[in-house]
Image (cartoon, rainbow, N blue to C red):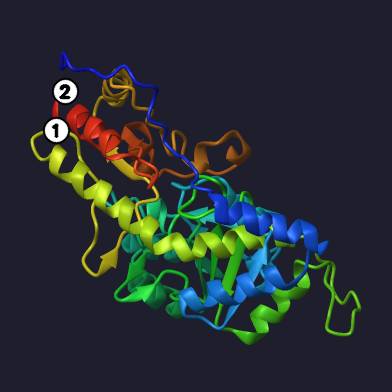
Amino acid sequence: MSDTRPLEPDIAIASPDVGETELRRIHDVLRSGHLSGGDEVAAFGEEFADYCTVAHGVPTSNGTTALHAALEALELGAGDTVLTTPFSFVATANAVRHVGATPVFADIDPTTYNLDPEAVEATAESHGDIDAIVAVHLYGCPAPMAELRELADRYDAALVEDAAQAHGAAYRGRPVGSLGDVACFSFYPTKNMTTGEGGMVVTDDDVLADRLRSYIDHGRDDEGNHAVVGHNFRMTDICAAVGRVQLEKLDDYVDARREHAAAYDDALTETDVVGPVEPDGCRHAYHQYTVRCDDREALRSHLRDYGISPAVYYPTPIHEEPAYDDVDASLPVAERAAEEVLSLPVHPSLSADDVRRITVALTEYEA
């Protein structure tokens, strides 16, 4: 331990950056009296779709409802099988169950923590009939979409991007959100941009977009009839107004995350801690800067001694959660990752001194 150990308050794992511009926009919406279903929501959907270079953006109440609505729009339900990763937030699989479909899990790549295409192929072959693949761009690292697209086409399955952590990431020159049949984002406060709570579904498919808009608004059609049994998954104009401001800042936010990540990469070169990778052709958005370590608790304790608050995403693979105790699966790569990963603060609100403190702590860690 360095004798210059800081005494400042903890460096938090996340710190939403909401400023005066967002506050003014919220005030404008409140004064307008039009708080839901108005022009702000429509504009935010269009602007976010443009950012993702797709035709349609449908704002929702949160990232989970975005996933749920996307699967409903794909007309997935009872009797259908959706293949996804066990190493994600549980909402990824919960959305599958909410539509009545069955989630099955394939193991992950040990370096990116995303779906391993070979494991996806083996799992699909063993199940015989896969109706959709939900690929999570975990921690902001794009999943191997070319291989997953080929597999989805082979099995005549829909390809869904769970991009809840990947705003601003890119794969082979294309923004995340433009790579599957439909993509879903979250704007929870810890994400790369926020609306407080909120989500977005983006797609190039006109039919899917119409189904999405109907489903999130109680199944309402263009004539005002309730044509299907839908939900109220609508975003408020207050959230959309914040999102429009945040979207203007997103590229700067991601640039800052990448700069911090590069500093951490340098600090890890002389340690036994394994840092994240950025696959060839990918732009990592670093929603989390996630390392792995044989003795995670020792590293976590060391970082806390420096006033740094790391976090574990995720300590339990989905198939081992109590709600999924009916799932019989052996997924050793995901299970080991859950025992070893640790995420460090990388958000754009970090000061230069914060980044220095984190790099010093990493440099001085001894296993």
Q: Compared to 324, does 277 lie above or below?
A: below
Front in this rendered view, residue 102 or 99: 99
Q: Compared to 318, does 128 lie above or below?
A: below
Residue at 50%, 44% in the rendered image: 16
- Tell me whether the residue at label 1 lies in contact with that at label 2, contact meaning CB atoms closer than 8 angstroms: yes
Q: Compared to 143, does 348 lie above or below?
A: above
Quadrant hosting residue 172: bottom left
* Residue type pointed to by label 2: Ala
Front in this rendered view, residue 157 or 364: 364
Circle 1 residue:
272
Disc on res. 367: 2
Q: Position of residue 216 (x, y in %)?
A: 75, 66
Quadrant hosting residue 354: top left
Disc on res. 155: none
Quadrant hosting residue 311: top left
Front in this rendered view, residue 320 or 345: 345
Estimate the spatial distance between the alpha carbons at disc 1 and disc 2, rounded to whole Å: 7 Å
Q: Position of residue 134 (x, y in %)?
A: 50, 63
* Residue type pointed to by label 1: Asp
275 left or right, relative to 10:
left
Front in this rendered view, residue 286 or 5: 5
**Would you say residue 293 is visible in this rendering?**
no
**Would you say residue 114 is visible in this rendering?**
yes
